[in-house]
Amino acid sequence: MSSSFLAIFLAMAMALSSCAAARFDEQFEASWALDHIIHDGELVKLKLDNFSGAGFASKNKYLYGKATAEMKLVEGDSAGTVTAFYMSSEGPKHNEFDFEFLGNTSGEPYLVQTNIYIDGVGNREQRMDLWFDPTADFHSYSILWNQRQVVFLVDETPVRVYENREKEGVAFPGDQPMGVYSSLWNADDWATQGGRVKTDWSHAPFVTTYGDLRVDGCRVGGEAAAALESEVRRCSASESGEEGRYWWKDPVMQELSVHQSHQLMWVRAKHLVYDYCADSSRFPTKPAECGR
Ligand SMILES: *[C@@H]1O[C@H](CO)[C@@H](O)[C@H](O)[C@H]1NC(C)=O
Ligand SMILES: *[C@@H]1O[C@H](CO)[C@@H](O)[C@H](O)[C@H]1NC(C)=O
């Protein structure tokens, strides 16, 4: 296949799947505090007050794919609040990919923390600020996951990549089906300026608003172990499937393009404020996945 044909094909596949973008209730359900989840036309809102935060979860689990949330974060004084958008598997050896948006006092910038858990172990935090005000408008935040890489994207700009280097003995979050989650809660013991700024409840309720929510992934159902096994085999087969159905595995999705690599370099140079890989007081020995 020529690369331009492939590009057209991919664009078509993506257009098709976004037409099929299911409405919130088809793909998601409240996971706690039902009365703090508000449906407002096409939008969904999570509300945090001094009584409760709220969260929702995908009804299905997925093995590889891409999850995207269009979000407008808590505006004004959001200090102490955290909005999270993440994928996670279950159990003590779970894998997890996190976006955590740490609120701030009015006019001060949000920080975006990302983290990756593999086999139940996290401690892979990075923090960045953004090149726009995430409270003024909707922006898209995505997690792309295939067997070659995990990519965190903001408005389709890659902000973090975790490559598969299993061949070199570096752990990679592989074949565990994951759910997609989002929540808003009070974390004023640590979130804002290291926990020094507390949530000001006189400014409640705090609200995060969701536009489109999309999960394109290989769905894993089946309660019976045998069924689950065969679905895991199907989803983790290396090909992108009939008619490119599993487009997140296509060759162009397996590594960043040159353009994307440049974008990532720009983000790291201009917006990264913390990287565990560079924190030698926490990690006197550099974690295996950090640099070659
Ligand atoms: C929560 O906030 C409301 C409105 O400000 C206030 O009336 C109420 O006493 C607060 N409740 C608690 C448990 O702090
Ligand atoms: C909040 O604003 C302060 C001052 O600009 C900044 O140092 C901090 O990184 C911001 N974010 C958080 C989550 O504290």
Image (cartoon, rainbow, N blue to C red):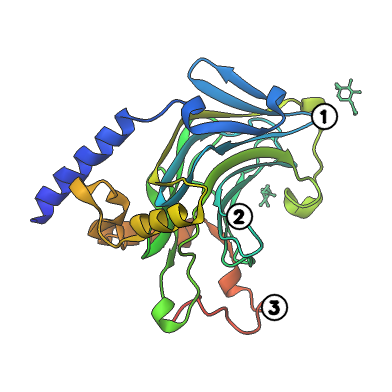
x then y, percent, for residue 173: 49, 65
Q: Is mark 1 within 8 Å of ligand 1?
A: yes
| N-terminal label among 3 and 1 | 1
Q: Is residue 116 visible?
A: yes
Q: Is residue 263 visible?
A: no
Q: Residue visible at 63% across and 73% down?
A: 279
**Residue holding disc 2:** 90
Q: Residue visible at 80% across and 38% down?
A: 199
Residue type (three-letter) at the residue carrying disc 2: Glu
| N-terminal label among 2 and 3 | 2
How far apart, in angstroms, are the residues tagged by discs 2 and 1? 28 Å
Quadrant where the N terminus lies? bottom left
Residue type (three-letter) at the residue carrying disc 1: Phe
Q: Residue visible at 67% across and 37% down?
A: 184
**Residue holding disc 3:** 281
The disc label shown at residue 193, or none: none
Report helix, strand or loop for mark 1.
loop
The disc label shown at residue 51, or none: 1
x then y, percent, for residue 267: 44, 56
Horizontal side, residue 207 vs residue 138: left or right: right
Q: Is residue 25 above or below residue 219?
A: above
What is the total number of numbered labels drawn onto the structure image? 3
Q: Are marks 2 and 3 in contact (CB under 8 Å)?
A: no
Report helix, strand or loop for mark 3.
loop
Report helix, strand or loop for mark 2.
loop
The quarter of the rendering in which ligand 1 is drawn is top right
x then y, percent, for residue 75: 63, 30
How far apart, in angstroms, are the residues tagged by discs 2 and 3? 31 Å
x then y, percent, for residue 198: 82, 42
